Amino acid sequence: MYILDINKKHLPDTKAQIGIGTLIIFIAMVLVAAVAAAVLIQTSGVLQQEAQATGKQATKEVSSNLMVHKIEGYRAKNSSTDMATTLDLIKITMGLNAASEPVDLKEVVISITDGYRTNNLVYAGNTNSRAPSPEFEGNMSGISTTNATANLEKLLTETSTLGDAEINVTYVNSQVYFTVDNIRDEDDSFSQIHPVLTTGDLVVVYVSTASQSSVNTGYTTLRSINVSSTLRSSGLNLEPRATVNMVLTPEAGASANADFILPTTYGSNEMVQLYP
């Protein structure tokens, strides 16, 4: 049986807090927590985006690698027995390492030195690098969109005047440009205007190294190109025993270096294997 104790008193709970002040403090704590959470979420989002961008750039830097397969040099000539004492054209066969990112050859810079002079060359179809002012195009004058042989001939024999009557500059093509032709291009990524190199592609890069002595002699032919009385000097002089350093620097990724010492004599060879 339950017996009600009428003498038991209910004491007030002195530990509880009531009133508008407590409510304000509670709401303030909720607002502070919400603001802090929003800041953390925004900051983590920004950091994630920056980390992804940095990761992509780092991946591109280590995966976009040019591979130089071989380098050959050619002598200007009048006949098989009358040839220059210098190498007047360099042919570079190259591709990409496995799993490399595509490389736009329009953005590649080739630096070549014979120990006395250095030429920094850009692709003949590059419209920006050699422009005398932003409103002008800087590509080699008269560049063909389809004919690589015609572009090689212009590289060896012509000059380019860029700009207008007020602002202009004239370049010797062989001192500032290089040209390219493709050997293998299964995905149709390569053209004379958009020379993009992808994994599996194989191209040849032509660099003029025509010496002043060859120009003065007036040789008629350079690798099947008619250069009779029109060959232009590159300023380089690739005589036997000279040390040549070449660096190919893409827009992103590692540079490709090729250092070699020219043979003690070229003998009767029109073409000389230089690298590897």
Image: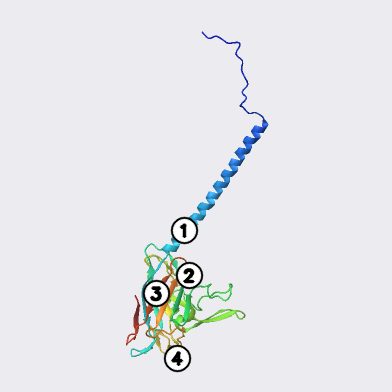
Badge 3 element:
strand
Q: Which label is found at residue 216?
A: 4
Q: Quadrant of the C terminus?
A: bottom left
Q: Are marks 2 and 3 in contact (CB under 8 Å)?
A: no
Q: Nearer the viewer, residue 139 or 188?
A: 139
The amino acid pointed to by label 1 is Lys
Q: Which label is found at residue 107?
A: 2
The amino acid pointed to by label 3 is Ala
> Is any part of residue 228 visible from this angle?
no
Q: Nearer the viewer, mark 3 or mark 1?
A: 3
Q: Earlier in the sequence, mark 1 or mark 4?
A: 1
Badge 4 element:
helix
Q: Position of residue 19 (x, y in %)?
A: 66, 29
Task: Name the side, left or right, on which 93 lies relative to 193.
Answer: left
Q: Earlier in the sequence, mark 1 or mark 2?
A: 1
Q: Position of residue 136 (x, y in %)?
A: 57, 74
C-alpha span from label 1 to label 4: 51 Å
Q: Are marks 2 and 4 in contact (CB under 8 Å)?
A: no
Q: Residue at x 52, y 52 (%)?
A: 47
C-alpha span from label 4 to label 3: 29 Å
Q: Earlier in the sequence, mark 2 or mark 4?
A: 2
Name the quadrant containing residue 272. bottom left
Q: Nearer the viewer, residue 214 or 42?
A: 42
Q: Is residue 27 above or below residue 117?
A: above
Q: Position of residue 199 (x, y in %)?
A: 38, 65
Which residue lies under the disc numbered 1? 56
Q: Earlier in the sequence, mark 3 or mark 1?
A: 1
| Mark 2 burial class by Cα count in 10 Å: few <14, some 14-19, many 20+ | some
